[in-house]
Image (cartoon, coloured by chain):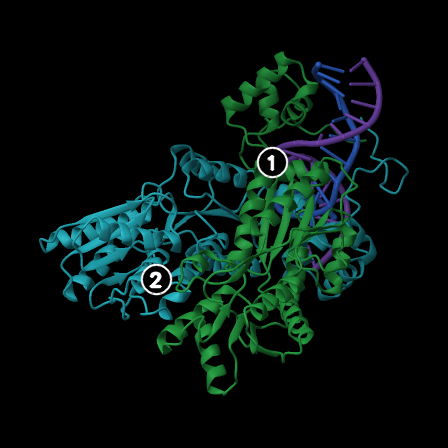
Chain colours: A cyan, B green, C blue, D purple
DNA sequence: TTGAAAGCGCTAACAA
DNA sequence: TTGTTAGCGCTTTCAA
């Protein structure tokens, strides 16, 4: 047998954080901690009288629930881990912004991290997030290390893979087909009368989705018997990289009347290079991009590009997750949100 | 008196997460959980023999520590909350990237959130992060709601305010002076012979730091007896906003030979507008920005701007925090990292 | 150097 | 509708 633990008010050394606890709220409101807990997460189950007393005690003491304690007791935290290749990349920033906003207003905390397009970093991040017992995980793309997939399956939580819908999702995929995007833009260029189209990407070994767009490009040119030229630049995409890439193509004496860049950032760099060299876009050279970033509509000439459903991906991911949290289980395994080809003046 | 709790292996309903626990590791290694815990966080205090047994048990079972349980027991989590105005903004993305990288490789988890330049959202975020018992908080800027400041002080943890060093930090400030940045660029324009300089910002009521740059501009023109014209655009900064802003200035018949934009994004929009209208930059009009974003060096003409110490702010913030975590207490309260004026062709 | 045991602050099963 | 109580999985005294 064992003595009852001494009350907290005694003189023993306390290890606590010094923060206001639910216990103090309960005491001030004259109820049990269960009631306080209920008021905070299932308000309907408590009488108005008690609920009000609890709420005013919460206010008066400035009580902030300890999520670690809550998550530990509930065996699942109210967090969602989100892993993207790069937050420096505006594509993903738009998605994360939407997703975080929606989830956090529904009471979920988003933990996000970026992999820098490395599978090893992705694996480490997934492991780190899993240590928080998240209620769900959101990854980018469908390619992950074997161990990442194993960890994710073992966690037995909803897993959304965004920005791609090609095949073999762990649980749910929300995105669009990059292969079709690549094919779509290439077909558009062909319809516009271009015959020598070059595809320029950067670090496509690690950017799986850019590689799929290149694949779509290859299919589209092959379909009409045109030659394919794919350039894979070393180094991460940047405006600064686009100009030299075009200059190099010119210097190598490659013949071409259109360049399809794997993203708008590179395309903008190329546009600047054309301006510097007095190359007429689109009369002499068509330039197309991917992403429909902020500047695409206002640069000179306005950039023909593909608009990915950035915000829609965030919105749909949040919706799927919230539905799963609410107990809904029969959901589509893949949600293809499509994309829009923005035909502007550059091509 | 009370019965001993039944052992876990019995048939009662378990609420646990199903994950491998420290208990199982301890059992497999034939040691107590205290020893496992010690091996994991103070390896020196355990004999090599036991430590090895523990480590191989950890490996064999694929044990991942539950951070909620750890944080709860230790009364402080190994997290750092980071609050920025916007992750869509590349300035902050660079800082967060550096900061997160450094902290996470030292074993700390970064929680980040964006306020959208709203004090109310900032307050809500700070409260949400505090619920995780973070080891430290990092905010952007020195202006916060009264309640935010109160919550932060009550938490008794290191607080870093980044991107500004002007005055009155809660704990530690790491950044540079925006007033000096504004003054510096304006003086540069004056030295270059400009006499009618207009300052254009966006939503400066909520962007405190842009307002300080405008203040510096005002001081600099006043110092040489030149008139000040400050335009505060409605809506958030974007490339799309820069062109119309310039067009409007032109339409209003304002006389000017230089425009100093509160950031590069607006300046780029204006550059495109000049290109469309055939306005010669810098011969007829000088354009200057702030931020030294990716495109600033490669646009046409290359943009004269101010380079804030984006990465250095992240690096220094991480260093300060890590020093505090290590027990160091006498640290400078403000770290001014300065900035660089990048004189290029646009002004 | 190691282990036993008492919580950290909360949630949820159960009883009333 | 409410309270009682047994943990959630760890860290940290304390004693050996």
Q: Is residue A117 above or below residue A64?
A: above
Which of the 4 quarters of the picture holds residue B6?
A: top right
**Circle 2 residue:** A272
Q: Nearer the viewer, residue A147 or B178?
A: B178
Which quadrant of the rendered structure holds the C terminus of chain A?
A: bottom left
* Residue B295 located left or right of residue A107: left
Residue A214 badge: none
- Residue A227 x, y percent position in the rendering: 13, 50
Please indicate, yes or no, whether residue A73 appears anywhere in the rendered image: no
Please indicate, yes or no, whether residue B38 appears anywhere in the rendered image: yes
Q: Is residue A40 above or below residue B102?
A: below
Q: Is residue C4 above or below residue A58?
A: above
* Residue C6 located left or right of residue A323: right
Query: At 57% from the left edge and 61% from the top edge, which residue is drawn?
Result: A105
Which quadrant of the rendered structure holds the N terminus of chain A?
A: top right
- Residue A81 x, y percent position in the rendering: 51, 47
- Name the subunit of mark 1: B
Q: Find the residue positioned furthest to the left.
A: A225
**Circle 1 residue:** B107
Which of the 4 quarters of the picture holds residue A295?
A: bottom left
* Residue B313 located left or right of residue A344: right
How many numbered circles are shown? Answer: 2
- Residue B342 x, y percent position in the rendering: 52, 58
């Amino acid at each position: 047998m064992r003595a009852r633990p001494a009350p907290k008010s005694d003189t023993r050394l306390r290890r606590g954080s010094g923060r206001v606890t639910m216990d103090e709220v309960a005491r001030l409101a004259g109820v049990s901690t269960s009631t306080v807990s209920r008021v905070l997460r299932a308000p309907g189950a408590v009488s108005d009288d008690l609920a009000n007393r609890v709420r005013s005690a919460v206010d008066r003491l400035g009580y902030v629930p300890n999520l670690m304690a809550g998550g530990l007791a509930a065996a699942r935290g109210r967090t969602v881990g989100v892993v993207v290749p790069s937050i420096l990349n505006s594509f993903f920033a738009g998605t994360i912004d939407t997703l975080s906003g929606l989830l956090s207003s529904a009471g979920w905390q988003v933990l996000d991290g970026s992999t820098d397009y490395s599978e090893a970093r992705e694996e480490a991040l997934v492991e780190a997030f899993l240590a928080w017992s998240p209620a769900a995980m959101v990854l980018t793309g469908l390619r992950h290390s074997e161990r990442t997939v194993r960890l994710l399956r073992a966690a037995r939580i909803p897993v959304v893979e965004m920005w791609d819908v090609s095949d073999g999702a762990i649980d749910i995929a929300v995105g669009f087909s990059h292969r079709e995007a690549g094919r779509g833009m290439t077909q558009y260029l062909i319809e516009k009368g271009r015959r020598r189209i070059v595809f320029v990407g950067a670090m496509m070994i690690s950017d799986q989705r850019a590689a799929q767009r290149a694949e779509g490009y290859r299919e589209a040119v092959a379909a009409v018997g045109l030659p394919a030229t794919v350039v894979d630049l070393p180094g991460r995409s940047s405006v600064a990289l686009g100009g030299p890439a075009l200059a190099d193509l010119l210097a190598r004496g490659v013949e071409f009347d259109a360049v399809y860049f794997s993203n708008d950032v590179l395309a903008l760099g190329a546009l600047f290079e054309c301006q510097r060299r007095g190359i007429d876009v689109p009369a002499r050279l068509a330039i197309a991009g991917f992403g429909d970033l902020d500047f695409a509509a206002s640069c000179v000439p306005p950039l023909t590009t593909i608009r990915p459903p950035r915000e829609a991906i965030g919105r749909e991911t949040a919706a799927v997750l919230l539905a799963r949290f609410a107990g809904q289980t029969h959901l589509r395994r893949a949600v293809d949100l499509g994309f829009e080809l923005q035909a502007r003046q550059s091509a």
